[in-house]
Amino acid sequence: MLSASAARGAPRLDWRFVAKSMDRLILPMVFFYMLYLRLQLTLGDPRVLFQDAHLYYRATDAWVHGANPWQAHSDFGIFYAAPPPALLLNLPLLPFGEGFAACFWPIAGLAGMILAIRHFHLPWWWLAFPPFIEGILPASPDLALLGFLVVGGGALTAVAKPYAIPAMLAENRWRAVGLAVVLGLVTLPLLPWGTFLAEYPAISASLASQSLYSPLPLPFEVGVAVALVLLGRRGLASATPALWPAAQPHYGAFSLSAAASSRLIALALAFPGPLPISVAVIALAIVEVLRPRLPRRPVVPNREEIGPLVAAGE
């Protein structure tokens, strides 16, 4: 597309149009390429498909039958590491069996993805948003809980998945977080909190070993924390994937509000690990700090704009 100066015989490219076109092109290309890579990995070892659905069901079944739920594991060797309230998610599904749960959670997750996309008024190609794909293929309950979150059921989301709380606070869902605290207290005598707390070092070590990422250097993490503060709500919504080394890629689904408002954050969340999102938030924070100090180019009206003013004697 050419700017208005083309009418004066000096064609110039409208870089704003180019930037917008690239914005609309790059994200879908990255999303679908990452989808292709993830499908390749899944086809290489189909045991990973719906493994979270099986894992969460087995943990709940173990708890109901008096066993240690944190000893439950998937066929792929991933151990259950969620907090005790997450055991309640599969409690209504126990009468229907593990196979039913393995079908229920991907369907519920897809519904959650659609609700979230509609809530943030995003194009439908955001169904390929990599954190969504990283959640739907193993059938993680996180995507269904994201759907609950956007329709007003955030208390269940927060109590079952505490790492969603920073993003919830960024959206001013204080009431849901407060209700989640109350629900958590109610579950203290009902759920195996004692076992969880006693074995937390082992559970934490298991979670860290199942993560593919190493902690970032402490000075870098401090810089990331400062950048998140400078970014305000966008920073708070991005805190979990940016600061928690053990964060799984699908945790970024809860940062959808930040991704919807910043294409750089969306692009960073398309790649696994804390480093891309950490670099992105630092870059955005630098821009936020420098923006008020950057000189503004004066707006010079072109000939078509000043012609009528000159003719009118202004």
Image (spheres, grey):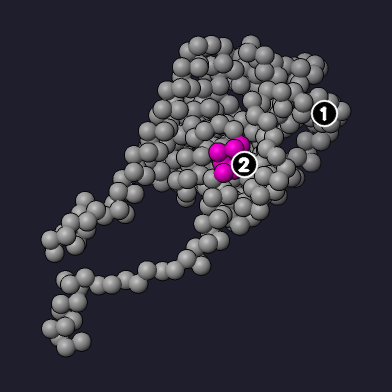
Image coords of residue 222 (percent x, y) = 70, 48
Q: Residue at x 63, y 13 (%)?
A: 76
Front residue of 27 and 153: 27
Q: What label sits on residue 242 in the rendered view?
A: 2
Residue under label 1, please give it: 201
Front residue of 170 and 87: 170
**Residue type for callout 1:** Pro
Q: Helix, strand, or loop for circle 2?
A: helix
Whether residue 28 can be seen here: yes
Number of numbered callouts drawn: 2
In the rendered view, tell whether residue 214 sits above or below residue 75: below
Front residue of 29 and 174: 29
Q: What label sits on residue 21 in the rendered view?
A: none
Image coords of residue 54 (percent x, y) = 62, 17
Q: Residues within 10 Å of mark 1 (few under 14, many from 20)?
A: few
Q: Which residues are magenta?
A: 274-279
Q: Residue at x 31, y 54 (%)?
A: 16
State the residue lying farthest toward the front: 10
